[in-house]
Structures are given as C-alpha cells and as structure tokens.
C-alpha cells in the first residue's frame, strides 16, 4: 500500500487536526475542570490514545490511515442506523454521515488502487 495519492495527505491531516482538537478538549475538560470527575480517569486515558492516533495519522502511518478508514466506515453505518431508526431527519447528522462517507471512500479507494508508476509493471 502506498499513500501517494494527492488527496490522502490533505484528508488524513485534516482528520488528524480534528482528532487532536478533540483530545485537547477532553484533556482540558477533565484535568482543569470538575466536570464529571468520576469519569476523568477514563477520558484522560482515551484522550492520550486519541492524541497518539492523531499524531500517527498526521505522519500518515499506514496502520493509522487504514484504521481511520475502517472507523469512518463504522461511523457511516452508525449514522445510517440512527437516521433510519429515528423518526426525524437531522441535517447535522446527514452532514456528518456524508463527510465520513466521502473520507472513507476517497482514502479507501486511494489505498486499494494506488497510482501506477511509469516504468514499473
């Protein structure tokens, strides 16, 4: 697998920035405030894992990119389940589902069909 597509670095780094912002928010919320202090240990550990995953995604480690595609696909399925099981159509949820689907589809396609290099067969 190669990550030579022009769209993969932009999308993976955008996802990495979003995940890093989420991890920073969790760290701030559970270290510096008293918000749900009984869950602080779990969320601080989760924030550290998410931050490490975001850094690996920023540097385009193959395992992180593949894991993000799989998690994005799982997110699309979760959004579809929520939209199909509920009686109300939520536009924000539709936007999240479309964004996750576009990310998973474009990065997954770039991973499955790497560009051909001239001179190599």
Image: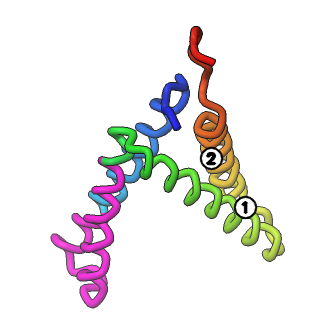
**Residue holding disc 2:** 104
Q: Quadrant of residue 106?
A: top right
Residue 96 x/y as whole percent: 63, 53
Q: Check whether the beta carbons of the residues at disc 2 and disc 1 lie within 8 A of each other.
A: no
Q: Is residue 26 above or below residue 56?
A: below
State the CA–CA distance, disc 2 to disc 1. 21 Å
Residue 77 x/y as whole percent: 71, 64
Residue 55 x/y as whole percent: 30, 47
Instruction: Name the residue rendered at 63%, 63% in the picture.
Output: 74
Residue 23's disc number? none
113 or 59, which lies in front? 113
Q: Is residue 62 above or below residue 19?
A: above
Q: Quadrant of residue 39?
A: bottom left
Instruction: Name the residue rendered at 39%, 39% in the picture.
Output: 60
23 or 107, which lies in front? 107
Residue 90's disc number? 1
* Mark 1 secondary-structure assignment: loop
Q: Is residue 32 magenta?
A: yes
On screen, residue 25 versus residue 14, left or right, reads: left
Q: Is residue 51 magenta?
A: yes
The chief SS type of the magenta part is helix
Q: Is residue 89 above or below residue 63?
A: below
Look at the image and give the residue range highlighted in magenta. Answer: 26-55
Mark 2 / mark 1, whichever is N-terminal: 1
- Classify 10 Å Cα crowding around label 2: few (below 14), some (14-19), many (20 and above): many
* Mark 2 secondary-structure assignment: helix
Q: Residue furthest left?
A: 32
Disc 2 or disc 1, which is closer to the eye? 2
Instruction: Name the residue rendered at 47%, 30% in the picture.
Output: 10
């Amino acid at each position: 697998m190669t990550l030579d597509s022009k769209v993969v670095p932009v999308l993976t780094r955008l996802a990495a920035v979003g995940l890093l912002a989420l991890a920073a928010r969790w760290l701030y919320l559970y270290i510096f405030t008293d918000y749900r202090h009984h869950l602080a240990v779990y969320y601080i550990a989760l924030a550290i894992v998410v931050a490490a995953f975001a850094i690996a995604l920023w540097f385009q480690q193959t395992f992180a990119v593949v894991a993000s595609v799989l998690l994005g696909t799982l997110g699309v399925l979760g959004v579809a389940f929520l939209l199909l099981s509920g009686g109300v159509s939520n536009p924000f949820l539709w936007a999240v589902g479309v964004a996750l689907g576009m990310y998973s589809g474009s990065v997954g396609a770039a991973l499955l069909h790497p560009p051909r290099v001239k001179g190599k067969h």
